[in-house]
Image (tube, rainbow, N blue to C red):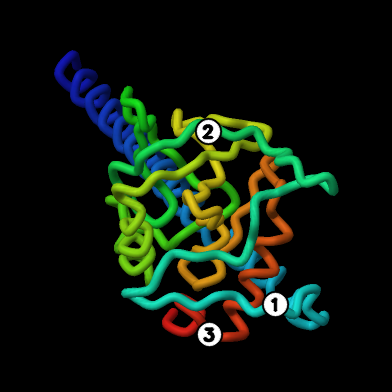
Amino acid sequence: MLVTRIAHDCKIAKRAQAKRSALQANALWLGVHSYYLWRFASWVLVFLVIAGCSQAPSVSSKPSPSTTDGGSLSSSAPPQTTSSGANTSTASDEYVVVRAIDGDTIDVRAAGGGAIIRVRLIGIDTPETKDPRRPVECFGEEAAKFTSRLVGKLVRLEFDVERVDRYGRTLAYVYLSDGTFFNLLLVEEGYALPYTVPPNVRHADQFVEAARRAREAGKGLWGKC
């Protein structure tokens, strides 16, 4: 009887373990697929917003600048100013770009020296290239290559309401020494889509309008993906 009882208890324990393993596997599956569904929904929402904007007349007749692989980095948008011409943004000192992580993330160091700071560009999102759980997304490598042209250049950082994200990255709008608004340039040339996360919404309308123009012109990922 004792042997029979022990065997019975072992069977019950094995069944319980199998159920726990199945529940853990289902939880992992749901977590991974929820992440992908959220990212897909974000891109679909951006596409719908841009498509809706394309039905209305453009608020600006000024064409966006074009760049080639050998061209200069240049954007049509000046830094935000008041009617008096004073800069309203909270800006930093100059930084040197030391590395491009991907299309929308860079490492910088103060021009006078110091620790390396990881910067996530606000308001935009380039195709993924660094996520080990998924393949490189369409036009991701091209976006990363374009951003890598910043390496060695001096930039100025402009901040919005929140300065740091949950990963500890500094959130900033990046300007080149000639005033080029690099976040906007990425969208204008089709390397990035608008990606607005409140409360950092200062240039959201500019990004949506730039994406609409890029889509109509078939630039970058709009023509390739």
N-terminal label among 1 and 2 = 1
Q: Is residue 214 left or right of residue 186?
A: right
Instruction: Kindly indicate whether the residue at mark 1 contacts the one at mark 3 (C-beta within 8 angstroms).
Output: no
N-terminal label among 3 and 2 = 2
Q: Nearer the viewer, mark 3 or mark 2?
A: 3
Query: Residue placed at 64% from the left, 61% from the top?
Result: 77
Gap in Å between the C-alphas at discs 3 and 1? 17 Å
Picture quadrant of residue 184? bottom right
Which is nearer the eye, 84 or 10? 84
Which amino acid type corresponds to the residue marked 1 in the rendered image?
Answer: Lys
Q: Is residue 205 left or right of residue 194?
A: right
Q: Is residue 25 left or right of residue 84?
A: left
Label ID, residue 62: 1
Look at the picture and state if 192 lies above or below 2: below
Label ID, residue 218: 3
Gap in Å between the C-alphas at discs 3 and 2? 32 Å
Q: Which residue is mark 2?
A: 165
- Label 1 SS: loop
Mark 3 is surrounded, within 10 Å at the Cα level, by few (under 14), some (14 to 19) or many (20 or more) other residues, namely some
Which amino acid type corresponds to the residue marked 3 in the rendered image?
Answer: Gly
